Image (cartoon, rainbow, N blue to C red):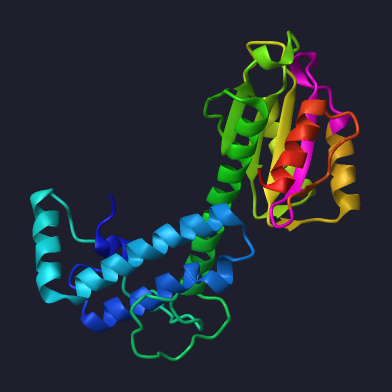
Amino acid sequence: MKSHYELLGVAASASADEIKLAFRHEIAKYHPDKVHHLGREFQEIAAVRSAELTQAYKTLMDPAARAEHDAGLASRGGTPFAPPPSGAAEPMTPPSTPAARTPEPEPERAPSPQGGEPFARDRAGVTDLVRKAAVIRFRQAVQAEFGHCDEAPVQGFEFACAPSKGRFFGKIPPRLLARFVENVDAAAVADAAALASRVRRDDRRDICVFVMGPAVASVTELAHAVAEERRRPAPGGMKLVLIPINTRSWLAHIPHDAPPAVKALMTRLKQGS
């Protein structure tokens, strides 16, 4: 479990002003205005993180509570969080204000919207939450459609499972693999197909690969990429189905010969149930 210093990204020796600035920078990532369009799963994750950050801020801004937190950290053998090396860009204050019911430090000057290390960290944090929310929604849809599904880690994929055979009256459903990328384009489709081709097969299941992300290339580019991969012989003679998905709208490029169960899964995924 992260200490309050780690949650805010400050050193154990951080001053009140440094803690205040770090809190504003971190809490802005999960402001309701930034997550309301990303779905219930993302909003729930953002709400939990906002609560954690708020608690960390309140604790470290209260001298007595901070001393108690430091004592507990020391008793558990915790080590102070190391700040970024000297010379690194200083934290930037986001332009948005903290979410409702959170402490409101004095206004700070808004940063430039240009790049820089803090801006990159902010974007990386949001992308990670989008990924987690997308995987949660995908997993819930799979469980709702297929029932029990044996998950097993597969390198390069955030989700991998083999649905139970019992629900399909003897017909073996495909193995499901889901990979999250920032940009779903031809390169991402090719990479996912290459990773899926290395999956060890211990049965005669086909493989259905879902390549999902918030930015998606044109339909023409994706259609050509999928067609190109379909021309490659699949290892073991098993069928490889590739489905690009836009996680903002949950629209997907579904091959006409995709298994009916997979088409039903995509309908459920888009409906959010």
**Residue beneath the point at 60% across and 48% down:** 134
- From what the image shows, is residue 249 above or below residue 60? above
Residue in the foreground of this view, choosing between 259 and 233: 259
Nearest the viewer among 205 and 217 is: 205
Q: Position of residue 3 (x, y in %)?
A: 25, 58
> As rendered, which of 255 and 101 lies closer to the eye?
101
On-image quarter of the C terminus: top right
Left/right of residue 121 with respect to residue 155 in the rendered view: left
- Residue 269 colored in magenta in the image: no
Farthest residue in the top direction? 170
Q: Residue at x 19, y 60 (%)?
A: 80
User: Is residue 193 at all visible to an observer of this figure?
Assistant: no
Can residue 260 be seen here? yes
Give x and y (percent) for residue 198. Answer: 65, 25
Q: Residue at x 67, y 30 (%)?
A: 145
Left or right of 47 on screen, residue 191 = right
Give the extent of the magenta segment.
230-249
